Image (cartoon, rainbow, N blue to C red):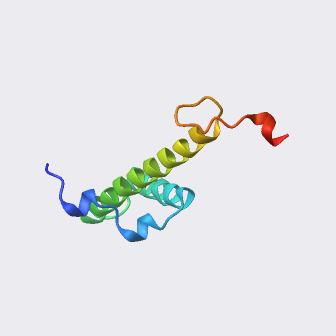
Amino acid sequence: MADNAETTTIPKDIQKLSFEAALAELEDIVRDLEDGRGELEGAIKAFERGTLLKRHCETKLKEAEARIEKILPGAPGADNVSVTEFE
């Protein structure tokens, strides 16, 4: 199954969500799909949105990880700021 622009580009409404909001919506989608609620077409659309929400959450986590690596002393890409400089 080939990806199309609709499934590879994260929509602006999802891009605006915080990690927590996206994760909460994703959890709701998973719960609904597991419970078998709704019709097939709705389940497919929910699955597609869930996939986009998952990718958005992964991106947010990678961004947070990169920020943390810059803060930690000795981490690759860190500014090598000494903790004692803040005491």
Q: Position of residue 6 (x, y in %)?
A: 24, 64
* 7 and 84: which is toward the camera: 84
Judge whether 32 appears above or below 72 on screen.
below
Judge whether 10 appears above or below 72 on screen.
below
Q: Position of residue 47 (x, y in %)?
A: 32, 56
* 47 and 81: which is toward the camera: 81
Asked which quadrant contains residue 45, the reply is bottom left
Q: Residue at x 18, y 59 (%)?
A: 4
Q: Residue at x 58, y 41 (%)?
A: 70
Q: Position of residue 59 (x, y in %)?
A: 43, 50
Q: Residue at x 64, y 41 (%)?
A: 71
Left or right: residue 41 versus residue 1 is right
Q: Position of residue 67 (x, y in %)?
A: 57, 46
User: Which quarter of the image is occupied by the C terminus?
Assistant: top right
Q: Residue furthest bottom?
A: 13
Q: Residue furthest right?
A: 87
Q: Residue furthest top?
A: 74
* 46 and 3: which is toward the camera: 3
Q: Residue at x 53, y 56 (%)?
A: 19
Judge whether 34 appears above or below 49 on screen.
above
* 10 and 39: which is toward the camera: 10
Asked which quadrant contains residue 83, the reply is top right
Asked which quadrant contains residue 10, the reply is bottom left
